Image (cartoon, grey):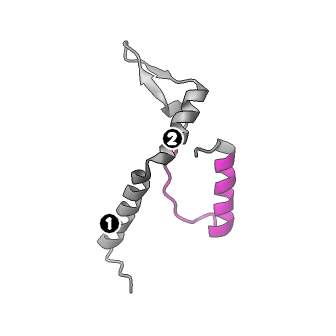
Amino acid sequence: MARTLQQLKESVENLISQQGPDAPVAAYIFTQEDVFVMNEEGEQVNQPLEIAEEVLNNLDEYDYLYEEIFNCIDNELRELKVLVD
């Protein structure tokens, strides 16, 4: 489920409270401005809010995106030779 920017802000504030303001983070944020098509003239045409909401909400159905990110984290840990007992 996609969140609003206000909900995202609240989540970030909670993370800061729990982990501290200097905790490292990697984030990928997509907003309604990222939901567009190109017209015949090669210009970006943003989609209406309702379409953008549906598209962004449906991204949660792509579990492999999360799996790939965790695979990347695992790869990075292996590169750093972090061992788990």
Q: Residue 80's spot in the image, x, y percent?
A: 33, 73
Q: Residue 27's spot in the image, x, y percent?
A: 50, 52
Name the residue type under label 2.
Asn
Using a 10 Å C-alpha cutoff, classify the residue at mark 1 as few (fewer than 14 neighbours), some (14 to 19) or many (20 or more).
few
Q: Residue furthest top?
A: 41
Q: Residue 57's spot in the image, x, y percent?
A: 55, 41
Q: Residue furthest front?
A: 61
The tag on residue 75 is 1
Query: How far apart are labels 1 and 2 at the CA level?
Result: 27 Å
Name the residue type under label 1.
Asn
43 in magenta? no
Name which of mark 1 and mark 2 comes first in the sequence. Answer: 2
Pick the residue in front: 32 or 17.
32
Q: Are marks 1 and 2 in contact (CB under 8 Å)?
A: no
Pick the residue in front: 53 or 11.
53
**Residue at position x 62%, y 68% in the image:** 19
Q: Residue 9's spot in the image, x, y percent?
A: 67, 50
The tag on residue 85 is none
Tell me if residue 73 comes above or below residue 44 in the rendering.
below
Specify the segment rendered in magenta.
7-29
**Residue at position x 40%, y 62% in the image:** 70
Mark nearer the viewer, 1 or 2:
2
- The residue that mark 2 highlights is 58
Name the quadrant of the C terminus.
bottom left
Q: Secondary structure at mark 2?
A: helix
Q: Secondary structure at mark 1?
A: helix
| Left or right of 82 on screen, residue 15 | right
